[in-house]
């Protein structure tokens, strides 16, 4: 009823109004806060309560355990390495202080670009970045300089998403693009063993290699003590902010699978692919790290659960999802085993399979259509 | 011979307002309208002028290109008004009923004794031919085409759809006669699909002269298009016909009595209906004589998924057997998408908690529950489409207007109603039915 405004002058943010050029931004805040009062005009007269915002917020909720654990772990790693003796809450607090700027930079830069491009395209702002903005801080080393993060986010959002037409049109997972951009643009800053653990002020950085790098050099015998299988599973190890804890990631996986937001087929087949290659590598003598270690090392699990399952960039057909997931897992471990220069293969495996997902779908659909035509012909 | 078709995919939308199995009243309309827009593919030619007297069964319109197809008055009376829209497009012929009930006698006959041409001729001159729908594309059938087969769905699974066992239970004899007449029109036989749940109690399970199938599963199991795709999918170049069961009954009554009797029980349903039950009325009856909803209520002719919006001062259509009343959902909801529980809303997705209350019926309104977005989540489409097609690929081919791909992805097999649930479940709030309809229109234009 409040909408019945008969004055001819347009509102402040409406087209023709004083700040009319900002109407998309104003709409975005409006629709961000509300489920709009729009009614159906064509097609089905009633619609399901679900919308894209709900889907996105579910993913964000699924990421919360990994994010919280990552915050605590950031503090815990610093405390352990430098012998600071922080308690649980102190670890969490210090970690929060260290990681919060990552989240702020990621969201601020990404949403600003998102809003601006919606303004240019004259569309409603898409909520896809709510997830991407949360993912990016979780897959970077904690000590990444904020300006680098800002540039990477800008690159990923502009060239990974907006040039294709925004969320739903992109070919590659934008969060992984940001990670790849950082890795290839600033390799000296992004690899090695100094970046994974935050050094407190006034202290010289000490090397804190990730277990993946340790295993790459020393094999399975190097993974003992603080790096035993249990610790790898629990996640109190050095690594990117959100990727270390298998437990926290599995909680997220349960949420995603239960709500149907992410495909369990991709997760299962990715694990199967990784396990198979890890096992072959082990019996083939390439490595002495058992296959199950590969599943909890590095970013494999995080990538499988949260990145490979992105509904936009993964395969769309059900059969295609099995193939896509399997290849993601298999390729990731292949890179790990055969590429000495780069310990983690998950990022590249997913980006590569993002590229090939449409091809997989094309094959699946073609096979299905020719099968169908045969069936109809014989019917 | 019969076979059971078991469908798993689909969705029954738990909306409030199912019609009680009782007839509240019989409407004797003062005015009825014959709307050429009810028949897809009809280019009407007017056969009457304002003031002309007509009887029930008198021709009012003919098809321009196939002048043997006539459209007749459902009542006796006089032509009151010829309603035209933009570019003089004929929208309706309004006939004032004199209440005398005079009707043209087409002569009762034995349908089995008729030749194909005689059977088609009888349907054409009585005005019932327009009730035969031709697939692909869902247009009015052509008498000179011999279809591969004729399909009849004797039940509907659409939300709150009228219960055919109740509306036509007493007319089983007429349905039988209608089936016999239709079987004269094709060499491929008449396929009749019954609900597997109520098969043994169905008044139609003893129908002869038809190949009977039973179908089980959630909506759209009752859609004839879904049934065809499981019984005998349509190939390029093939034509099948479908006839709504209510038209089959009218054909049967014509055969048995020689008269055009179109009166049907209309289910008045929906969360905004005060007393959901049946009303007996003729096609073309003014909406206001059936329902009188207040402000802010949408009147839908048909079900909530693929019905058309009826104006409060408009008339119901030739095929209308259901009216659904819905509140317009124009209220905004602050942070609605972030609330953990929204107990008043239904969602088929486990992202909400509707699965905790599986037997609850919901008071639904017309709110879109979100804003339009690009396609993101697309598995939901195939989850509600029990056909051997990839809905998202068909939808995208229709959007791109690529004829080859539309053919490959199954445009011949679908009508918008078959993908209506995709409209409902899409979190990106696209109008899938409109996309499919535009694809079909393009096919008709290009393949003509």
Image (tube, helix red, strand yellow):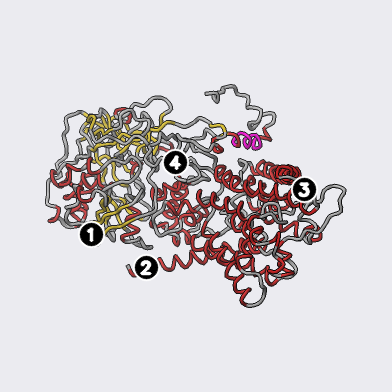
Mark 1, other Cα within 10 Å: few <14 / some 14–19 / many ≥20: few
Chain where mark 3 sits = A
Element marked by disc 4: helix
In the image, taking residue B309 as reference, residue A314 lies left or right, namely right
The residue at the point 69 percent across, 31 percent down is A19
Question: Element type at marker 2?
Answer: helix
Q: Chain of mark 4?
A: B
Image quadrant of residue A295?
A: bottom right
Label 3 vs label 4, nearer the camera: 3
Give the secondary structure at mark 3.
loop
Disc ID at residue B354: 4
- Same chain letter for marks 4 and 1: yes
Quarter of the figure with the N terminus of chain B: bottom left
- From the viewer's side, name the closer residue of B233 and B287: B233
Which residue shows up at 63% across the image and 27% down it? A11
Q: Which mark is residue B339?
A: none
Eye-nearest disc, 1 or 3: 3
Range shown magenta: A23-31
Q: Earlier in the sequence, mark 3 or mark 2?
A: 3
What residue is pinned by disc 2?
A: A375
Proximity of marks 4 and 1: CB atoms separated by less than 8 Å: no
Separation (CA) of disc 3 from disc 4: 48 Å
- Spot occupied by residue A185 in the image (x, y as percentages of width and height): 78, 59
Name the mark nearer the viewer: 3 or 2: 3
Q: Are marks 2 and 4 in contact (CB under 8 Å)?
A: no
């Amino acid at each position: 009823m409040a909408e019945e405004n008969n004055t001819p002058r347009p509102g402040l943010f409406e087209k023709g109004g004083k700040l009319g050029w900002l109407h998309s931004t104003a709409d975005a805040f409006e629709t961000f806060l509300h489920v709009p009062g729009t009614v159906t005009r064509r097609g089905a007269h009633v619609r399901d309560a679900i919308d894209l915002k709900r889907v996105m917020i579910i993913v964000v909720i699924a990421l919360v355990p990994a994010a919280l654990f990552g915050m605590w772990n950031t503090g815990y790693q610093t405390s352990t390495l430098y012998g600071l003796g922080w308690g649980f809450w102190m670890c969490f607090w210090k970690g929060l202080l260290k990681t919060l700027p990552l989240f702020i930079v990621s969201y601020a830069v990404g949403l600003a670009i998102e809003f601006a491009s919606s303004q240019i395209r004259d569309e409603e702002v898409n909520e896809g970045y709510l997830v991407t903005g949360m993912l990016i801080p979780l897959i970077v080393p904690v000590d990444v300089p904020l300006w680098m993060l800002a540039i990477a986010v800008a690159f990923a959002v502009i060239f990974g998403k907006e040039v294709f037409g925004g969320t739903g049109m992109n070919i590659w997972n934008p969060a992984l693009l940001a990670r790849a951009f950082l890795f290839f643009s600033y390799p000296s800053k992004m690899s090695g063993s100094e970046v994974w653990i935050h050094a407190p002020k006034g202290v010289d950085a000490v090397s804190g290699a990730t277990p993946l790098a340790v295993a790459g050099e020393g094999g399975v015998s190097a993974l003992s003590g603080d790096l035993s299988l249990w610790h790898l599973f629990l996640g109190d190890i050095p690594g990117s902010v959100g990727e270390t804890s298998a437990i926290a990631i599995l909680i997220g996986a349960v949420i995603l699978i239960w709500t149907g937001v992410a495909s369990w087929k991709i997760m299962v087949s990715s694990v199967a692919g990784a396990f198979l290659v890890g096992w072959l590598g082990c019996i083939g003598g390439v490595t002495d790290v058992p296959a199950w270690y590969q599943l909890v090392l590095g970013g494999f699990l995080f990538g499988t659960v949260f990145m490979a399952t992105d509904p936009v960039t993964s395969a769309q057909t059900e059969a295609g999802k099995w193939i896509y997931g399997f290849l993601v897992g298999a390729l990731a471990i292949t890179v790990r085993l055969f590429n000495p220069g780069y310990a983690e293969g998950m990022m590249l495996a997913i980006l590569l399979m993002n590229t090939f997902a449409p091809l997989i779908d094309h094959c699946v659909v073609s096979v299905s259509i020719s099968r169908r035509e045969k069936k109809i012909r014989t019917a | 011979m019969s076979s059971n078709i078991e469908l798993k995919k689909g969705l029954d939308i738990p909306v409030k307002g199912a019609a009680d199995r009782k007839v509240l009243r019989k409407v004797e309309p003062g005015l009825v309208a014959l709307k050429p827009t009810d028949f897809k593919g009809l280019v009407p030619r007017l056969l009457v002028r304002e003031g002309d007297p007509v009887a029930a069964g008198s021709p009012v319109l003919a098809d321009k290109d196939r002048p043997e197809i006539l459209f007749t008055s459902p009542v006796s009376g006089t032509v009151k008004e010829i309603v035209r829209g933009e570019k003089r497009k004929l929208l309706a012929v309004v006939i004032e009923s004199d209440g005398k009930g005079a009707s043209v006698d087409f002569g009762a006959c034995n349908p089995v004794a008729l030749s194909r041409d005689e059977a088609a001729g009888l349907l054409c001159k009585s005005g019932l031919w327009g009730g035969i729908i031709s697939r692909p594309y869902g247009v009015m059938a052509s008498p000179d085409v011999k279809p591969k087969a004729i399909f009849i769905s004797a039940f509907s699974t659409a939300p709150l759809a009228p219960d055919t066992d109740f509306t036509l239970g007493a007319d089983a004899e007429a349905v039988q006669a209608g089936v016999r007449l239709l079987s004269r029109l094709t060499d491929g036989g008449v396929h009749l699909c019954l609900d597997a749940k109520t098969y043994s109690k169905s008044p139609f399970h003893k129908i002869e002269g038809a190949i009977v199938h039973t179908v089980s599963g959630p909506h759209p199991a009752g859609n004839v298009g879904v049934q065809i795709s499981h019984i005998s999918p349509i190939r390029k170049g093939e034509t099948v016909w479908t006839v709504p069961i209510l038209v089959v009954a009218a054909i049967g009554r014509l055969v048995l009595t020689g008269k055009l009797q179109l009166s049907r029980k209309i289910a008045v349903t929906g969360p905004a209906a005060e007393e959901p039950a049946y009303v007996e009325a003729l096609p073309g009856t003014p909406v206001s004589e059936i329902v009188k909803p207040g402000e802010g209520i949408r009147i839908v002719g048909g079900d909530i998924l693929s019905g058309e919006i009826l104006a409060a001062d408009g008339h119901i259509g030739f095929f209308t057997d259901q009216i659904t009343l819905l509140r317009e959902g124009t209220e905004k909801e602050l942070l609605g998408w972030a609330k953990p529980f929204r107990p008043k809303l239904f969602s088929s997705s486990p992202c909400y908690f509707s699965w905790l209350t599986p037997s609850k019926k919901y008071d639904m309104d017309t709110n879109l529950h979100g804003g339009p977005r690009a396609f993101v989540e697309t598995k939901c489409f195939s989850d509600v489409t029990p056909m051997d097609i990839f809905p998202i690929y068909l939808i995208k081919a229709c959007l791109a207007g690529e004829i080859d791909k539309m053919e490959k992805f199954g445009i011949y097999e679908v009508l918008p109603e078959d993908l209506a649930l995709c409209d409902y479940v899409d979190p990106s709030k696209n109008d899938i039915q409109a996309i499919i309809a535009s694809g079909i229109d393009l096919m008709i234009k290009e393949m003509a």
